[in-house]
Image (cartoon, helix red, strand yellow):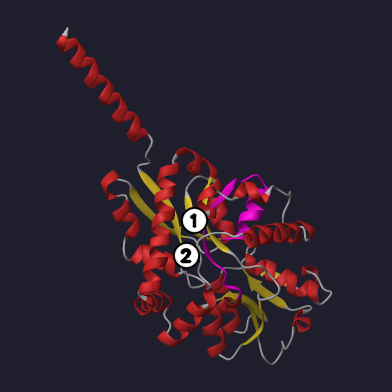
Amino acid sequence: MFRTSLSVLFAGLFSASLCFAADLPKEINIVYVKAPFNLQNIVMKEKGMLEKAFEKDNIKINWKTITSGSKQTQAMAGKSIDISAVMNTSSLLMANGVGNKILIATGVSHPADTFAIVGKPEAIQSIKDLKGKKIVGPKGTVLHQLLVAALNKEGMSIKDVEFISMDQPTALAALLAGRVDAALLAASGVIKAEKSGTKVITTAKDLVNVNLVTTVTEDFAKKYPEVLDTVVKVQREALDWIKKNPEEAIGLGAKEHGIDMDDARKLASWSNYYNTLSEKDIEGLQKDQDFLFDNKMMEKKVDVKSLVLPSALK
């Protein structure tokens, strides 16, 4: 009788441990994005903060470099990515507009000053000069939204220019080689372009509500809520460390971007890092959705509040 009871007890404990193990993923596939100047992401990766946080659970962290927001959302739809440490809300909204349910886990930054349209100074003096010109940059991103917003302000549309989708490094190279008239760039890309003799035509400030956030697939958020909470906790610990060690953190960013400390300090000061979304951020999501939908960049409207997880609000 006693042995039978022990057998039942151990069987129950073994079953419970299996159940707990099933509640944890074997690995987390997370996007690494260093641009525009994502110090939280850089610090997390360089210091192995996520690896340490999940070491006891034997969860492997797989960092994947995907710079385009639209490509990030495609990878999340294909289930090869669980979390994006940094995604612009324009890409998030467009993904949800086609039924790719991606949610906001926490905030990252509001770096409007770091996103810009950069052009040849001899040919492009203003947005109006872009008419009929060849412009390159990543489609389906906040930079794409910036171009449309800037053109709209001057009474033009995307049809008035020759827009070619291209990632930022390639866009910068094309601009500096003289193969295109303007490029959509961010952060160190803008600084490098200016130092090479090009001109900033406009930044996103007062044109686009630039909000970078950490996102997660709906499936992962539902299946592993405690794991996601740990990722958010580590992200916020990274920001706390940055605030306490600003020069060391900026040094890591300067090295990763290949720029000097003065330029790195400038980008950090423009980044406006944050964690918790405010009511203003929610309103910004709604305004961005209206803009994207009205300009046929988003197929279907969604309830923006449903895209924000509780972890992003506290």
Q: Would residue 42 appear left or right of 16 to someone viewing this image?
A: right
Residue 116 on image: x %, y %: 63, 77
Residue 127 on image: x %, y %: 75, 81
Residue 96 is one of the magenta-drawn residues: yes
Pointer 2 residue: 33
Residue 180 seen in the current view: no
Kindly identify which numbered label has been placed on residue 223.
Answer: none
Kindly identify which numbered label has been placed on residue 84.
Answer: 1
User: The disc labelled 2 sits on which kind of residue?
Assistant: Val
Find the residue positioned furthest to the top.
Answer: 1
Q: Residue at x 67, y 90 (%)?
A: 121
Q: Quadrant of the N terminus?
A: top left
Q: How far is disc 2 from disc 1 in space, using C-alphas?
A: 8 Å
Q: Residue at x 50, y 51 (%)?
A: 311
Residue 28 on image: x %, y %: 40, 48
Tell me the magenta residue range. Answer: 88-112
Counting other residues with Cα less than 10 Å from the Cα at mark 2, is it few (<14), some (14-19), or many (20 or more)? many
Residue 85 on image: x %, y %: 47, 59
Q: Would residue 126 appear left or right of 228 to someone viewing this image?
A: right
Find the residue positioned furthest to the left.
Answer: 3
Q: Would residue 199 appear left or right of 291 to someone viewing this image?
A: left
What secondary structure is found at the residue carrying circle 2? Answer: loop
The answer to whether the residues at label 2 and label 1 have Cβ atoms under 8 Å apart is: yes
Find the residue positioned furthest to the right.
Answer: 155
Q: Quadrant of residue 146?
A: bottom right
User: The disc labelled 1 sits on which kind of residue?
Assistant: Ser
Q: Residue at x 56, y 81 (%)?
A: 190
In the image, is residue 196 above or below residue 47? below
